[in-house]
């Protein structure tokens, strides 16, 4: 009789262990599925971060280029102002008409007129 109970007990333990192993297997499958979704989300996030870095780099390059252009314009304007000051200082005029060179600079004309 003990052998019957021992066999039935062993059979019940085996059934419980099988059920527990099946439960663990289902939990593992669920965890692997969640891990796969997480990996995809992280890859998408990494792609987004890469795109944002690329956009930031492009903005930085554009800003640097714009700054370079502004510096060149400022240098040109400073040179024109120096030329104008020199023309005025050396003209000897106080309340007289500005020299033609000074007027051309103020009008931002780059070429000299054909007739004086």
Image (cartoon, helix red, strand yellow):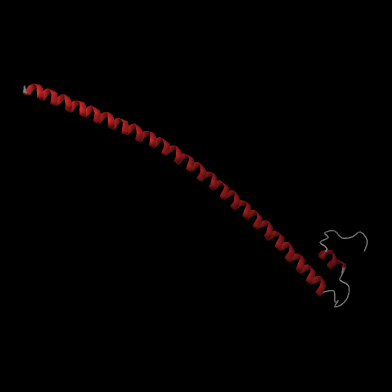
Residue 109 rendering spot, x and y as whole percentages:
83, 60
Question: Residue placed farthest to the right in the image?
Answer: 115
**Is residue 89 shown above or below 44?**
below
Q: Residue at x 35, y 33 (%)?
A: 30
Q: Is residue 90 left or right of residue 14?
A: right
Question: Considering only vertical position in the picture, is 88 above or below 74?
Answer: below
In this view of the protein, which residue sits in the foreground, 2 or 88?
2
**Residue at horizontal 74 percent and vertical 64 percent from the top:** 77
Quarter residue 75 falls in: bottom right
Residue 68 sits in which quadrant?
bottom right
Q: Give left or right: position of 43 versus 100.
A: left
From the viewer's side, name the closer residue of 99 and 62: 62
**In front: 57, or 37?**
37
Query: Which corner quadrant holds the N terminus?
Result: top left
Q: Is residue 54 left or right of residue 65?
A: left
- Residue beneath the point at 21% across and 29% down: 17
- State the image quarter where residue 93 is shown: bottom right
Q: In x, y percent, where is residue 84?
A: 79, 69
Q: Position of residue 99 (x, y in %)?
A: 87, 70
| Callout count | 0
Q: Furthest-left residue in view?
A: 1
Where does the image place residue 73, in percent across and percent down from the top left? 71, 60
Question: Which residue corresponds to the image point at 36% horizontal and 34% vertical from the top-left?
Answer: 32
Q: In which quadrant will I find the C terminus?
A: bottom right
Q: Is residue 31 left or right of residue 87?
A: left
Q: Is 106 drawn above or below residue 14 in the view shown?
A: below
């Amino acid at each position: 009789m003990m052998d019957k109970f021992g066999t039935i007990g062993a059979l019940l333990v085996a059934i419980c262990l099988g059920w527990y192993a099946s439960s663990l297997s289902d939990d593992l499958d669920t965890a692997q599925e969640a891990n796969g979704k997480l990996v995809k989300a992280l890859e998408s996030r990494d792609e987004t971060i890469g795109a944002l870095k690329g956009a930031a780099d492009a903005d930085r390059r554009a800003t640097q280029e714009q700054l370079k252009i502004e510096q060149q314009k400022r240098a040109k304007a400073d040179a024109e102002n120096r030329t104008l000051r020199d023309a005025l200082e050396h003209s000897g005029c106080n309340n007289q008409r500005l020299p033609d060179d000074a007027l051309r600079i103020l009008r931002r004309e780059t070429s000299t007129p054909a007739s004086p």
